[in-house]
Image (tube, grey):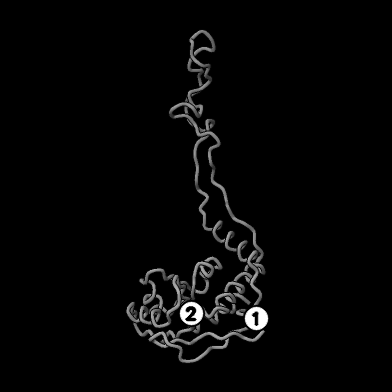
Amino acid sequence: MAAPKAPFLDAAGKKSKDVTLTADVFAVEVKPQLIHETVRAEAAAARSGSQSAKSRGLVSGGRSKPWRQKGTGRARAGTTRAPQWTGGGVAFAPQPRSYTLKVNRKAKRSALRGALSELAGRSALAVIDASGFKEPSTRAAADLVGGWGKELPLVVIAQPEEEAVAKSFRNLDRVLVLEPSELEVGALVWARSVIATEAALDRVKELAS
């Protein structure tokens, strides 16, 4: 398959030239099931799993039988800590647990390449020059996004040292700014378009290869 191209955007969001992308990363077969499994694993890993409640065995008190078994006219009861009692334990009480799902490293990288290839295939991936942002400017970022004219939501990928880029885009509505190390398949699936700086794009290639 021929190597895809991505537009290199100027400050106005217009294409100044084309950037040739690596076919091994941006022009591979998209495997929806693999992407689905990876996104599920990422969402599961984000869950804290800290929910907890006390079962009847953990609630204090209720040792003695509240009344004798027979002759009172009331239903028999063995403890005031049963779930039907006020202050009693919770039936089937949730306990802290891990929701982690296993996805192999090769499968994760393949899913990442597939998500990137899907974006590149419909021309929803663009590259910018980080040096164009000497200082943070939300207006400049908005002009660039508006000039490009692609559909939101948008993911912007920038290196940690490209702070001016991150600060420029992070206040825009429906725009998520990430470092390459933070990039997940779920973010690429959520996004309708992606903008990356040159340095960040090189790093993404390394992570996906």
Where residue 11 sits, quadrant-wise, is bottom left
Front position in the image: 44 or 20: 20
Mark 1 in CB contact with mark 2 (< 8 angstroms): no
Residue 67 versus residue 118 in the image, above or below: above
Q: Secondary structure at mark 1?
A: helix
**Residue for point 54% across, 42% down:** 95
Other-residue count near label 2 (Cα within 10 Å), few / some / many at <14 / 14–19 / ≥20: many
Which residue type carries mark 2? Ala
Residue 153 in the figure: left or right of residue 23:
left
Front position in the image: 152 or 90: 152
Q: Position of residue 75 (x, y in %)?
A: 51, 16
Residue 168 in the figure: left or right of residue 68:
left
Q: Position of residue 153 (x, y in %)?
A: 45, 70
**Residue for point 65% across, 65% down:** 34
Identify the residue under disc 1.
24
Residue 196's disc number: 2
**Residue for point 67% across, 69% down:** 106
Q: Secondary structure at mark 2?
A: strand
Q: Position of residue 84 (x, y in %)?
A: 49, 27
Residue 26 in the figure: left or right of residue 64:
right
Name, please, the residue furthest toward the top: 71
How many numbered marks are there? 2
Quadrant (top left, top right, bottom left, bottom right) of the N terminus? bottom right
Where residue 134 sits, quadrant-wise, is bottom left
Residue 98 versus residue 7 in the image, above or below: above
Which residue type carries mark 1? Asp
Residue 184 versus residue 85 in the image, above or below: below
Other-residue count near label 1 (Cα within 10 Å), few / some / many at <14 / 14–19 / ≥20: some
Marked residue nearer the N-terminal end (1 or 2): 1
Quadrant (top left, top right, bottom left, bottom right) of the C terminus? bottom right
